[in-house]
Image (cartoon, rainbow, N blue to C red):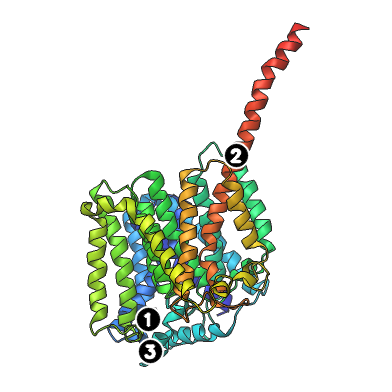
Amino acid sequence: MHPAIYEALILGLMGSSGVGAGLLLGIRQAIPLAIVALGATTVLRVWTAFAVWSFGVPSWNLEVWLVGSAVLVLGGIATHWRLWRVGVAALGIFAGLSVTSLSTKYLLDIGERHHSDISKVLGVALVVVQGDLDDLSQAAGSYKRGIAYPLMLALGPEGRILGGFTPLVFLMTLLLAGWLARQILPWTVSNRVLGIVALGLGLFSITVPMFRAAMFYLNGHTLMGFSVLLVVSGLVLTKKERRFGYLPTAFALTGGVIGVTARIEGVVLILVVMIALVAQQSWTKAADRLRLFAVLGLSGVSLTWWLTSLSSPVPERLNLPENSLLMLIGLSIVGAAVAASSFFDIARPVLLPALALVLLFVLGRQVLLANDPVGLVLAQWPNLALGAGGWGTAAHVFIGSVVLLSLQRRSSKYLTLLYVVWMLIGAILFTKTFDGGSFGGVGFYDSVNRMWLHVMPTVLLLSLVGYSEALGRLLRVRKEAMARAEPVGAGSLSAH
């Protein structure tokens, strides 16, 4: 069978099972259903792999995922067959993006962007493919680079990775950012305005080498950015709807599980957005609190399940006591229960300010204790300001945009996104302090330089919302001015 056909069948099964999962999660709109489909099928892949590893039958890895996928497809059809039009529309969106992704590989022959880390990612994928291997130490030892991404790559045809997966994640991220911007923006901002802003940002992004590379970059950074944006989506939709409904739950759940298993530093990034979610004053209904508990608990348990199923060396390297992972599972569940309870409501207003202060304190302490504080602060200057990291003028435009858009009164949604973006940037620098105590080095392949991809989808969303609000307001003021001028002109004409 031709590899392109094999990949098309796998992506088709991913889309079908993901749509089935989305319907079971209560999603009733085609675009978000297609987006959640990618997240849900990735979560299924992660959980089924953990299950076969936990039971000592790694050779069943693919088979269990296939069975789980079939169950989700049949479950979605059996329980929500009346929503077949929504399901078919979502599948059409997923299929269209999948065909585009495969075309970049098999028609346009665009190769992957890679570097030395990729050999380790592909090594883990190989361990997964050769499921009869009893020694999973390579997969356990590569915890820094995560497990979710290699698991998805391992679904490719024999002797090849699933090449269409990374471009699909990239395209789905763009779709999520655009769709979510439309949900956040008031309907007084037209689709035409949003389209103009999106076109402008798209044309600018083409000039940034790192953005162009992200679509074909064989590493978990693109998947990590997608997962962070999923949780951010759950946050802003909760803020907008003032409740934690089915759609925010699905976004936060899939994003949380993928994020804590895609990259080890993703734990901190997901925690930051989860704290922002918990801090919302939206928890008035018991059902919403139960969903919040499920999202927090399952995300935490997924992390510890990953480490326990592979007998990861992480606890030893952190000097944690024996049975520490079981304790972490218990803490995840208890912590989720406390965060979702009404007793915690009194603490919600201070959560975000407290988190910001903690990040500032930790980063400030790191700078003050450094041998070269100025050099530490300017560690990313060559990458972001001088072009060494492949970011072009992206950092300049981001800072300029924040300053420019702050000159006018902004919506609460924009301010929430801006707050989260700054905390994610601080969290990225914080996670690097665990690895040598620096804020990175110079060059395209510096780890911090590549970790900026984790926050870029959220920055894209922030820019779409901010510029659309500004342009929409400008056009409304112009229209109102013209409307006020019209009667005067008409009156003068009639007088003559």
Q: Where is residue 486 in the image (x, y as percent from the top left)?
A: 69, 20
**Circle nearer the N terminus (2, 3):** 3
Q: Residues within 10 Å of mark 2 (few under 14, many from 20)?
A: many
Q: Distance between the residues labelled 2 and 1?
A: 51 Å
Residue type at tag 3: Leu
Q: Which tag, 2 or 1, sits closer to the chain's start?
A: 1
Q: Residue 136 carries which label?
A: 3
Q: Helix or strand or loop: what does disc 2 sit on?
A: helix
Label 1 element class? helix
273 up-or-down from 120: above or below: above
- Please give the name of the residue rendered at 43% of the width and 51% of the height, measured from the top-left corner: 236
In depth, the one of 152 and 418 nearer the eye is: 418
Tell me if residue 314 comes above or below residue 367 in the rendering: below
Q: Which mark is residue 400?
A: none
SS of the residue at dot 3? loop
Q: Check whether the beta carbons of the residues at disc 1 and disc 3 lie within 8 A of each other.
A: no
Residue count near mark 3 (Cα–Cα under 10 Å), binned few <14, some 14–19, many ≥20: some
Q: Nearer the viewer, residue 53 or 437?
A: 437
Residue 86, given in percent of the width and then of the height, sits at 44, 51
Across and down, in percent, residue 327 comes to: 23, 76
Residue 339: quadrant of the picture: bottom left
- Of the numbered discs 1 and 3, the one sitting upstream in the chain is 1
Q: Distance between the residues labelled 2 and 3?
A: 55 Å
Could you tell me the amino acid type at mark 2? Gly
- The residue identified by callout 2 is 472
Q: In which quarter of the image is residue 215?
A: bottom right
Q: Quadrant of residue 40?
A: bottom left
Cα separation between marks 1 and 3: 13 Å
**Residue highlighted by disc 1:** 61
From the viewer's perspective, tell me whether residue 314 is left or right of residue 406. Answer: left
The residue closer to the viewer here, 32 or 411, is: 411
